[in-house]
Image: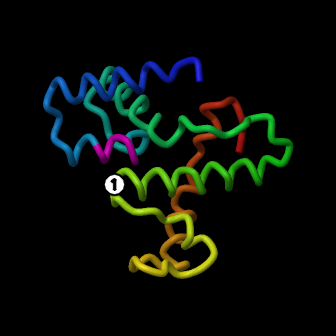
Amino acid sequence: MRDAWRYRDYVIDSLNRDKPLDRFITEQLAGDLLPAKNRRARREQLIAVGFLAIGPWSLAEQNKEQLRMDIVDQQISRVGRTFLGMTLECSRCHDHKFDPITLKDYYGLAGILAARRLLRVFGEAT
C-alpha cells in the first residue's frame, strides 16, 4: 500500500511521545469514531486505523461481499493476535478448542467490524 508509511510513522511517533497504551490501542481500533480536539488530532486518529485498513487482501476480487468478509476475517485475526495474544480464526467454524472464544464471540466481533466502512479507504463505496 503506497501510504502505509503513514501508519508506521504514527506508531513510531506514538512510542516516542510515550502515548498511553490504552489510548494507542483505542486509536487503532476506533480512531475514526473518536472525537478529535483539532484537525491534526483527527488526521492522526484516522491514520491510526491503518492497523485495521492495511492488509494482504487483493482488491481485484470481483465478489465485493467476499472481499469485505475476507477483510473482516483478517482484522479479527490481527486483533486477536495483537491484543489478546491468541488466534481466533478457528472460532469462525466452531468454538475454540483451548480458549474461551466461541463461534458466537467470533461473529459478534465480525458484525462490529463488518459495519465499518474501511473499504472507502480503497475507493470502494460499500
Q: Which residue is drawn at 53% across and 38% down?
A: 53
**From the viewer's perspective, is residue 61 above or below residue 2?**
below
Q: In which quarter of the image is residue 113?
A: bottom right
The image shows residue 99 at horizontal and vertical percentages of 40, 77
User: Which residue does the numbered mark 1 point to in the structure image?
Assistant: 83
Q: Judging from the image, what secondary structure is the residue with disc 1 in?
A: helix
Image height of 105 relative to 73, above or below: below
Amino acid residing under circle 1: Phe
**Whole-percent x and y of residue 96?**
49, 78
Q: In this view, does 58 lie to the left or right of 115?
A: right
Depth check, front residue: 90 or 37: 90
Asked if residue 6 lies in the magenta stretch, the reply is no
In the image, what residue occupies the spot 69% across and 50% down? 68
**Highlighted range, magenta:** 25-29
Name the residue: 68% across, 55% down: 69
- Which quadrant is the N terminus positioned in? top right
Per the picture, the main secondary structure of the magenta-coloured stretch is helix
Q: Nearer the viewer, residue 126 or 1?
A: 1
